[in-house]
Each structure stands twice: as C-alpha cells, then as structure tokens.
Image (cartoon, rainbow, N blue to C red):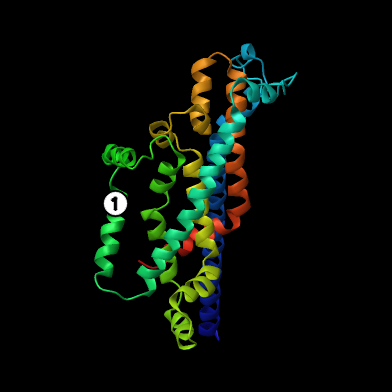
C-alpha cells in the first residue's frame, strides 16, 4: 500500500508539474503576442503620422503650417484651400490625364500579364523555361539603364509628347507575368485537361476557367499597377512636354515651383492626389493578402 501511495503521489506531482509548465508557456506566449501587437500598432501609428500632418496642414493658413507644437486639429479649418487649388493650376486636366493613363495601362497590364502567364504556366512549347527566365531577368535591370534607348525609339516612331508612348512602354510587365504565373501554377492542371476534353480552345480555357479563378491575383496586380502608374513621375516628365498632356504628379511639381510658399495649397493638392489610390486599395484589400499568399505557393 505504501509503495502504491508513493507511486500515486509521484505521478500526481509529475502531472501537476507538466500542467504548471503548460500554463507558464501559455502565459509567456500571450505576453509576447501582446508585445508584438503593441510594436505593430506603434509602427502603424508612426507610418500614419506624416499623412495626418499633411491632412492637418491642408486645412491651415500658410503661416500656421509649421508652428510648434503642432496643432493637429485646426481651430478654424480653411476648406478654401481645396477650392483654390483647382484655379491656381489646371488641376482637373492633370487629374483626367492621369486617370486616363492609369486606367488604360492597368487594364492592358492585366490582360497581357495574365495571358502570357497562362502560356508559361499551362502550355508546353519549345524553350518555354528559357524564354520565361530571359523575360523575368529584366526585372533586375534598372529602368535608368534602358531609359535613353527607349526615348530614342519612341521619338523615332513619332510618339514623343504623346500619351501613347507611356501606354506602349507600360502595357507589359515582367513582374505581372511572374506573379500571375505563380498563381496559375497553383491551379490544378486537371481543370485545363478536362476543359480540353470537353472541346474548349486555349482561349476559352483562359477566359472561362483561369480568369474567374484568378480574382485574388488580378486584384493584387491591379493595386500594384494602379499605384505605380498614378504616382509615376519620371516617365511623364521625359515624354510629355505640352502642358495640356501632363499628369498630376508633373502638375504638382509645376505648382510647387510657382507657389513654393503656399504650403496649405500644396498639402491640399497632395491629399487630393492620394484619394484615388486609397479608394482602389480599400476596395480591393480583402483580395490583396490572399493574392500575395497565393502567388508565392509554388516556384
């Protein structure tokens, strides 16, 4: 009886020790999780502070923009800044030009990238991998390297000072092809084989099978392309000379050079330029993380 009692006591103490260790590890895990969330929240706040200051400065008089301590909420908000900016420069024309280029380039990139990615992911042809690697290797080459040859080529084709030059150069994206191919490789080949057995052509498989399944990847590529094209400064600066053809970023630069001391108007124009980007990102954000994760599943 004593031996059994000792064994029972020893087993009970060992179980109690394991339970205590489990509780301790759980508490430690929760502690570090709280610390991680606190750090991420602090970083998010730090990232948002410049945007909050820009929004606050856009509602102030020029003399009140740089006062210290910062007045985050102006006592007398100057909403007139958002009206005056439209009359100081042809802002509406710049916005329309930028919207035109951004929408056309985004649609063309979605079409060309998804179409090429389908060929590289689901079709078999000679030198497929070699062509893909050669095309993707252009991502590592800075645009400044071939910027001058591109300009000479566009000028020789008579596209200088036209929107068509920017559209033609940005309608194709090696990054977009790479990302869409990664996503398509995660789709079972059996779906394409079944569609071929049913008599569907490759074009129908692409449009009826692959595209409906690739909404997360297309949404992710839409965000990347829209933001890059909307915020593009160097391309329009090189190719566009006529004021009526210039984009929003060039227009903001023109305004800053002419009215460098009117900080309230500069901040108001900057806030207006961010609104379309925020709208696109917020409307597609539920697909964004899913698309990023899906395009990295297979190499």
31 lies above or below 17: above
84 lies above or below 225: above
Residue appearing at x 53%, y 84% in the figure: 4
Which residue has dot 1 on it? Answer: 138
In the rendered image, residue 171, in percent from the top left (x then y), is placed at 42, 51
In the rendered image, residue 132, in percent from the top left (x then y), is placed at 30, 63
Which element carries disc 1, helix, strand or loop?
helix
Sort mark 1 into few (<14), some (14-19) or many (20+) by Cα contacts within 10 Å: few
148 lies above or below 183: above
Residue appearing at x 54%, y 34% in the figure: 46
Q: On the rendered image, what quadrant is the N terminus found in?
A: bottom right
In the rendered image, residue 48, in percent from the top left (x then y), is placed at 57, 35
Residue appearing at x 63%, y 28% in the figure: 55
Residue 81 in which image quadrant: top right
Who is closer to the viewer here, 237 or 69? 237
Residue projecting furthest to the front? 158
Residue projecting furthest to the bottom? 197
Q: On the rendered image, what quadrant is the C terminus found in?
A: bottom left
Who is closer to the viewer here, 231 or 56? 231
Q: Is residue 83 visible?
A: yes
Q: Can residue 45 be seen in this view?
A: no
In the rendered image, residue 35, in percent from the top left (x then y), is placed at 54, 46
């Amino acid at each position: 009886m004593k031996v059994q009692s000792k064994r029972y006591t020893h087993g009970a103490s060992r179980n109690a020790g394991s339970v205590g260790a489990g509780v301790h590890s759980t508490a430690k895990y929760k502690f570090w999780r709280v610390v991680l969330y606190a750090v991420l929240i602090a970083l998010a706040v730090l990232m948002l502070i410049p945007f909050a200051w820009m929004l606050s400065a856009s509602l102030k008089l020029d003399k009140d923009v740089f006062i210290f301590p910062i007045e985050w909420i102006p006592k007398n908000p100057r909403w007139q800044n958002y009206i005056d900016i439209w009359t100081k420069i042809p802002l509406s024309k710049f916005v329309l030009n930028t919207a035109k280029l951004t929408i056309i380039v985004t649609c063309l990139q979605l079409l060309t990238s998804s179409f090429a990615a389908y060929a590289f992911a689901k079709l078999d042809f000679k030198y497929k991998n070699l062509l893909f690697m050669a095309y993707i290797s252009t991502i590592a080459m800075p645009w400044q390297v071939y910027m001058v040859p591109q300009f000479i080529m566009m000028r020789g084709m008579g596209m200088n000072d036209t929107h068509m030059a920017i559209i033609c150069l940005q309608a194709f994206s090696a990054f977009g092809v790479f990302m869409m191919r990664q996503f398509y490789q995660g789709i079972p080949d059996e779906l394409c084989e079944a569609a071929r057995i049913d008599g569907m052509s490759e074009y129908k498989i692409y449009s009826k099978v692959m595209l409906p399944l690739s909404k997360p990847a297309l949404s992710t590529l839409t965000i990347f392309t829209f933001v890059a094209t909307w915020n593009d400064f160097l391309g329009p600066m090189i190719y566009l000379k006529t004021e009526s053809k210039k984009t929003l970023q060039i227009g903001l630069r023109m305004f800053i050079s002419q009215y460098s001391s009117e900080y309230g108007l500069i901040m108001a124009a900057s806030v207006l330029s961010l609104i379309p980007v925020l709208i696109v990102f917020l409307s597609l954000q539920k697909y964004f993380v899913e698309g990023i994760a899906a395009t990295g599943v297979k190499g």
